[in-house]
Each structure stands twice: as structure tokens, then as C-alpha cells.
Image (spheres, rainbow, N blue to C red):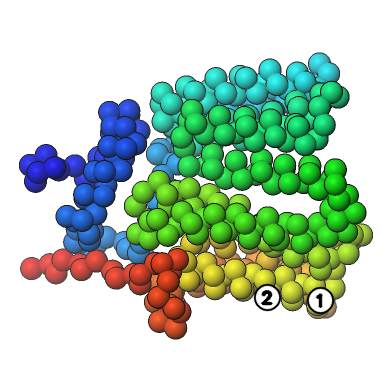
Amino acid sequence: MNQATRMSREQIDQAEDAGILTPKQARAMRAELAVTEPHAPPVTATDAVIGDEDDLRFLRSFGDVFIGVGLILLALGVSAIMALVGGGPVFLLAAVGAFVMAEYFGRRKRAHFPTLITALAFLLFVQTGLEGLASLSGIVAALITVAAMALFYARIRLPFCIALIAVSLIYLLFAVLAQIAPDLLRDRIGVVLILSGLAVFAAALAYDTQDTHRRTRFADNAFWLHFLAAPLLIHGLVGQAVMSKSELLFDLIPVLAFTERDAIIILIGMAVITVIGLAINRRALIVSALGYAGVAVGFLVSQTSLSLGTALSVTLILLGAAIVLLGVAWHPVRNQLIRVLPNWRIFPPPYEPPQTAVAS
């Protein structure tokens, strides 16, 4: 690739999405570009740069969002109709429809966000339809679901499909445990979720180590796996720490009942996940578990003498301020953290901001 015909990284992405380049050709061109142009071009003093953000490549434009909203409404409507006409196996017909739409939006248009919605619908329709077949055991239904998601990925080849395959594998694990160890699944479901989260997290790290600079599809695969791993880990922790009865938070919101000790355990777990997210430079690991942090903070605030409105306001202020401060200070804090960490490939190099052009 000579200087006259060299494409930018954005142009390569667009050419791949349009089908002009194959994924293999695009990977080769990105790899060459990473060698010849390892650093981003200089930015002007007016550019707003926080630095080295995770690219949301599944969102190209608001048009994709618009279509995605329509697909969500369509999937909900189809689900309602399928339930009205008998449910069960008829959901497999809806799964076929979701697959056809994924072929159009995923393979032809390369519209990632609409395809993400159809992929989720396909998984749910397949799982619901197979569970409605009395002739199939839970394990067989789960195996077919895994095979269906593997076929979906083989056809569509978009990164979020990796996370959906992981979801179907966890579904298979639960089906196997329900058959051979129901007591374990009932009494130690938190442990099962934690181990599942650790397995998904390990798979995400395996992809991350293949692309420490977050430039290829490996990074996108890892993004979605991290996004799945965090709630599995935190929900497993909650499952072990929290009693099964429910109560009303702020006398309004039904939640699982737990003590101040349990809330502190959840916050400690979030703190550990935050440090890990900083170390491996993955915000997705933190964002997908924020709901649990909000519940824990809200519970602790509700134990004070504050009124409902004040307690809710304080909770939102504390959580929002923590997120904003962490977001702004992400790279300075991370650069200090990795100085004390071992030189392992799972820890990406420190962020070095691009040089800004000085106005003459």
C-alpha cells in the first residue's frame, strides 16, 4: 500500500462495511497502517480530546438508531402475537423472521445496531420456541440454541454475536446443572454466576491480548464480552450476599432485602471491578454493573433520616459525580496504576495524548 493510495482507518472500516473489502483484506490493511502510522495525526487546539476512547462502531448514525427502535417495537409486537396464538413452538417462526432481517441488515447493509436488535430477538425467539417443545429436554434445547447462535455468527460475523454465543453457553450450563445438580443450582446460584462471569471475562481478555491498541475486531469482540461479564460477576455476588425475600427501597421500589453489610460488599465488588477496568482500559466492564452500585448506594442513603426525595437526590448526585470524576481522570489515574502493575500483555500501554498544533 503506497503513500498515494493509502486509505485511512475510517475509510478501511467504511469499505469493509460496504462489502468492498473482505474482513481478511481489511485486517491486513489495518495492520499495515498500524505499522506505518502508529500514532494519530496531530489535532488542533480547538479539538476536544479526552483520549483513547472505546469506539462504538456498532453505531454509524441516528438512522441506525431509528431503525433499531422500530425493530424493538416490531419484536415486542411479534412476541405478543406469538403468545396470543399459542406461544411455544410458534416462536420458532418468529426466529426465522429475525434471521432473515439479520441477513438483510447484517450481511447486506452492515448496519450493526439494527442487526444487534435482530440478533437478540433471534436468541430469545429460538430459546422460547425450543422450550415449548415437550419432546425436547432442557439440555437438548440449550444445545440447539448454542448451535443456532453459532450459525448466526457464521453468517453475520459481527462482534456482539460473540457475547450472544456466550449467553447461550451459560444457558446450556444452567440446563446441565438443572438436570444433574439441581440442589447446587438452587443453593449456590451465585457461585455459578460468578464462575460464568469469570469465564466470560477470561475470554474477553484473550481477545484483548490480541489487540492491545484496540484497532481490530478482536477489540470489539472483547468489548461485548466485558459488557456481559460484569453483571454476571456482580449479580453472582448479590446472589450470595442477599436474602431471597424482598422489600421496598424508599418505600417505593421493590428490591431484594439486604443489610448494610451486604450493600458494602456490593460496593467493594464494584470497586474491585473499577480497578480491573482501569488496569485493562475497559469502561464497559464498569458501566454494565452500575445499576447494582446505584441500588447499594441508595440503600445506604435510605438508612439515614433523609426524606425520600432527598435520599434519591443524594444517591443520584453521589453516583453521577463518581462517574464524571472517574471519566475525566480516567487516563491520569490509569497511567499511575499501571506503573505498579506487572508488564503483562493484558494491561495496555499508558495513554499518550496527541500533540496539539500551536496556533501561529
Give left or right: position of 123 versus 130: left
Label 1 sits on residue? 260
Earlier residue among tags 1 and 2: 1
Q: Secondary structure at mark 2?
A: helix
Residue extending farthest to the bottom is 340
> How far, Cα to Cα, is label 1 from label 2?
12 Å
Q: Nearer the viewer, residue 34 or 309?
A: 34
In this rendering, the answer to whether 90 lies above or below 327 is: above
- Residue 117 in the image, given as x and y percentages of width and height: 57, 34
Image-quadrant location for residue 289:
bottom right
Residue at (41% x, 67% y) in the render: 345
Residue extending farthest to the front is 180
Residue at (49% x, 23% y) in the render: 103
Q: Secondary structure at mark 1?
A: helix
Q: Nearer the viewer, residue 300 or 86?
A: 86
- Residue 258 in the image, given as x and y percentages of width and height: 85, 68
- Residue 178 in the image, given as x and y percentages of width and height: 84, 45
Residue at (60% x, 24% y) in the render: 98
Q: Quadrant of the C terminus?
A: bottom left
Mark 2 belongs to which amino acid?
A: Ile
Residue 328 shows in this picture: no
Question: Which numbered dot is residue 268?
Answer: 2
